[in-house]
Amino acid sequence: MSVKKTVRKLDTIYRGIPTGFCKGLCHDSCGPVAMSLFEMARMRRAAPPKFDPKDHISCPFLDHETKKCRGYDVRPAICRIWGATKSLACPHGCTDTIKPLTDLMARRIIDESLRIGGESIETHPGAVRDVLFQAVRL
């Protein structure tokens, strides 16, 4: 599948995820997450990961100074689902006004993003470093 077609398919899936008004307060929830290889390549291209050898629990795409995602516009399905389901509810009330996805719907979105984007990879530092050296090119 071409890169453009993969992007279109993922973006179509992402449009099915409800969004609320984000207050930007959830940075404490950003940790290692599973994402497809394609989503990882997209994130890496938008915002090369930064590793803190003392911090193994934060997402390497989180800017610790601004407390914002450096690849927010191309974030993976799991990050988009944060706050859009009852089981991953936003603790800051940013998505209280949306109709949440059911857990089954959220699982299907994640499964589909992995099917389209390739096998899953976690964003812990070792996994990201491994992916950086694989032949995943955009």
Image: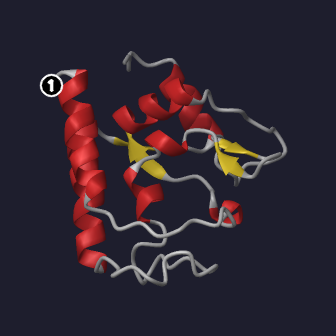
Q: Is residue 132 visible?
A: yes
Q: Is residue 129 left or right of residue 75?
A: right
Look at the picture and state if 97 lies above or below 23: below
Q: Residue 60: x, y in percent? A: 66, 41
| Disc 1 residue crowd, few under 14, some 14–19, many 20+, Cα 10 Å | few
Residue at (26% x, 43% y) in the render: 10
Q: Is residue 13 left or right of residue 41?
A: left
Residue at (58% x, 52% y) in the render: 32
Q: What residue type is labelled 1?
A: Met
Find residue 129 and report its image quarter: top right
Number of labelled discs?
1
Look at the picture and state if 138 lies above or below 40: above
Q: Is residue 112 left or right of residue 126?
A: left
Residue at (32% x, 63% y) in the render: 17
Q: Residue 118: x, y in percent? A: 27, 37
Q: Which of 70 and 123 is in front in this view?
A: 70
Q: Is residue 122 visible?
A: no
Residue at (84% x, 45% y) in the render: 54
Residue, far left: 1
Look at the picture and state if 96 lies above or below 62: below
Circle 1 sits in a helix, a strand or a loop, which is it? loop
Q: Residue 105: x, y in percent? A: 23, 72
Q: Which of 44 and 57 is in front in this view?
A: 44
Q: Residue 34: x, y in percent? A: 45, 51
Quadrant where the C terminus is found in the figure:
top left
The image's colouring method is secondary structure
Residue at numbered disc 1 = 1
Quadrant where the N terminus is found in the figure:
top left
